[in-house]
Image (cartoon, helix red, strand yellow):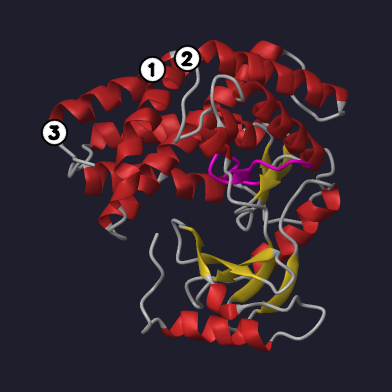
Amino acid sequence: MSLPSPSDSRLADLKLWLADLAAPAPKLLPDSIRPASSDASFRRYFRIDAADGASYIAMDAPPPQENVEPFIHAAGVFGKTGVSVPKVLAQDVARGFLLLTDLGATTYLNQLSADTAHKLYLDAIDALILFQAQSQPDVFPEYDRALLQRELMLFPDWYVGKHLGLTLSDAQGATLNKMFDAILANNLAQAQVYVHRDYHSRNLMVLGRGNPGILDFQDAVYGPITYDLVSLLRDAYIQWDEEMVLDWVIRYWERAKRAGLPVNPDIDAFYRDFEFMGVQRHLKVLGIFARLHHRDGKDAYLKDMPLVMEYTRKAAGRYTALAPLVRLLDELEEKAPQFGYTF
């Protein structure tokens, strides 16, 4: 990952802002700044060293495309629950600059293997339950029908329309709307808790203490209890055997019940909730990945589409109510042009 060019005016402004920070901010070394991670949004993250040898993270979130206030709010809310999140040390809301504590450079995705997965996922499940158990309404926006529906519409608009280059017939559109209604009926009937919305291997950091470190929480909402578990276990960037996923789902369910969380008391019904929530998320993600490619020129996500489609088909194929969705996907794939991508 290369440093932005010298003509990058926002980077120059960010360095000046960092250099001018007064106590209690740490004494920073602006010339040590270098990219820390990439992001699917307009946000950028840089790592910067301090005179005492520690490192910190500087966020550049350019207005009007980005707003740092939801990040600041969510960092405070999640931080109070006891999970590990970056602390906001300094802020310039108007310009979209933040200075954060550094949770390191080792993501779950970098560290996950057959040997490490079980421990890492149990840590992530325990952290998930910890913040879910302290959920309260009116802290985050509601993950209501309008928002869930808007996310689902990314699938016909961007995946079908832009990526496959197809127009749904009236009958196909009616089928898809019926499937959306069935999915949303399940999603909206679930108990509500704090929802991170992207609780997966690229946003969880491996820590020595307080594992995991949790990033990218600025879009948090109050919504269906299975959503973050789906993000974690049906991850677009890494796949696990169905038996392992089922084992982790059951372990979450058992621990959540002990913690007093309002999970469905029947494990089969809870797993159905998990799968229906997954179909909503997978369809959304297919639309988002298509949009990142076609609108934003970010091609890296194309290689992850087949796994997300596999998740969608397998989950929908297990339920009679969603069988028409599988048939619709068959029709679309038969008509779609065959893409050959090289990475």
Q: Amino acid at mark 1?
A: Ala
Q: Which structural element holds mark 1?
A: helix
Looking at the figure, which quarter contains the C terminus?
Answer: top left
On the image, the x and y values in percent for residue 206 come to 65, 41
In the picture, the disc for residue 63 is: none
In the picture, the disc for residue 323 is: 1
On the image, the x and y values in percent for residue 63 come to 51, 78
Disc 3: which residue: 338
Q: Residue at x 64, y 85 (%)?
A: 19
Quadrant of the rendered image containing residue 226: top right
Q: Report whether 52 appears left or right of 81.
A: left
Number of residues whose C-alpha sits closer than 10 Å to that of mark 3, classed few (under 14), some (14–19) or many (20 or more): few
On the image, the x and y values in percent for residue 173 come to 30, 37
Q: Report whether 272 appears left or right of 44.
A: right
Report the magenta residues as a range. 195-210
Q: Nearer the viewer, residue 119 or 43?
A: 119
Of badges 3 and 2, the one in the foreground is 3
Can see residue 264?
Answer: no
Can see residue 226?
Answer: yes
Q: Amino acid at mark 3?
A: Gln
Marks 1 & 2, CB-CB < 8 Å contact: yes
Disc 2: which residue: 319
Going from N to C along the chain, the mark reached first, 3 or 1, is 1
Going from N to C along the chain, the mark reached first, 3 or 2, is 2
Q: Which structural element holds mark 2?
A: loop
